[in-house]
Every structure is written in structure tokens, then in C-alpha cells.
């Protein structure tokens, strides 16, 4: 049985405020073999649909912004437009679970950025 392993960690220390590390690791069964798509995609400053290629049902996805200066926003499509929901800052990666059947759109901040999408089939 194929497994997708997901690890999350969030800890904050800012002066007298702190939030303890609440790391979590879990695995998810991958029913259909496939993933890593669509790879590196150039996202421009106008909204565009992210094409996940041959993946019929994208699930867990690692998104990496390769740009050193500009952030990129992503979110679901509603009435043909982006609903900004997720921001990936320059040089960072995020892991998120995509909802089946949702069209994902993206838009770069002030200049085109290269973003790596590694979506796994579920």
C-alpha cells in the first residue's frame, strides 16, 4: 500500500509571546499511483488556472516559490476569478491538501515567478 507522508510544524517566539511547537506527522493512503505534477510553472501577474496535467484527482500538494523577491497567491476559482486564499512568500514552501474538483488559480505579486507544484494523486 502506498502512503503519502505529511509533516507539519509551527512554533513562534516573539518577545514575551510564544506558541509551542505543535509538530504533527501522519500518513495518508494513496489509492491511485501518480504525482509530482505539474512541476515548475511560471505564474504571471494576471490570474491563471493551474493545470495539474495527468493527475485526475490531485490531493496533497507541496508548493514552492522559487522567486527571491515576489510572493504568489493561490485559491479556488469562483465565477471565473481567483479567490485569494493562500500566499506563498519568496523562497518558501507550503504543503496543502487540495479539494477534489476545485479549479485552482494563481497570480504573482509584481513580476512573473517560477513555482514548483508537486501534487500527488489520491
Image (cartoon, rainbow, N blue to C red):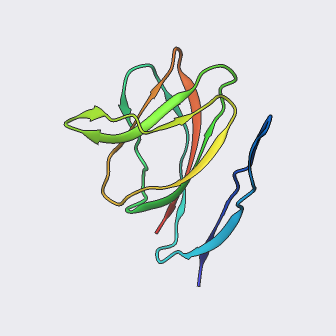
Residue 33, position as x, y percentages in the image: 52, 72
Quadrant assignment, res 49: top left
Residue 94, position as x, y percentages in the image: 61, 46
Q: Nearer the viewer, residue 82 or 49?
A: 82
Q: Residue at horizontal 37%, vertical 62%?
A: 56
Quadrant assignment, res 48: top left
Q: Is residue 31 above or below residue 13?
A: below
Q: Nearer the viewer, residue 6 or 50?
A: 6
Q: How many marks?
A: 0
Placement of the N terminus among the 4 image quadrants: bottom right
Quadrant assignment, res 17: top right
Query: Which residue is at the far left?
Result: 79
Q: Is residue 46 above or below residue 18?
A: above
Residue 79 relative to residue 12: left or right:
left
Q: Nearer the viewer, residue 52 or 97?
A: 97
Query: Which residue is at the far top?
Result: 110
Residue 102 relative to residue 120: left or right:
left
Q: Residue at horizontal 38%, vertical 58%?
A: 99
Residue 74, position as x, y percentages in the image: 44, 37
Q: Residue at horizontal 70%, vertical 23%?
A: 68
Query: Which residue is at the far bottom?
Result: 1
Amino acid at each position: 500500500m502506498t502512503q503519502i507522508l505529511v509533516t507539519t510544524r509551527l512554533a513562534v517566539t516573539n518577545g514575551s509571546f510564544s506558541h509551542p511547537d505543535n509538530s504533527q506527522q501522519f500518513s495518508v493512503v494513496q489509492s491511485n499511483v501518480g504525482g509530482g505534477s505539474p512541476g515548475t510553472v511560471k505564474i504571471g501577474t494576471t490570474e491563471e488556472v493551474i493545470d495539474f496535467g495527468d493527475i485526475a484527482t490531485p490531493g496533497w500538494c507541496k508548493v514552492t516559490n522559487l522567486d527571491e523577491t515576489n510572493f504568489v497567491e493561490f485559491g479556488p476559482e469562483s465565477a471565473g476569478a481567483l479567490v485569494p486564499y493562500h500566499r506563498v512568500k519568496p523562497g518558501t514552501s507550503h504543503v496543502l491538501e487540495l479539494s477534489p474538483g476545485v479549479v485552482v488559480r494563481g497570480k504573482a505579486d509584481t513580476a512573473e515567478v517560477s513555482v514548483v507544484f508537486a501534487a500527488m494523486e489520491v
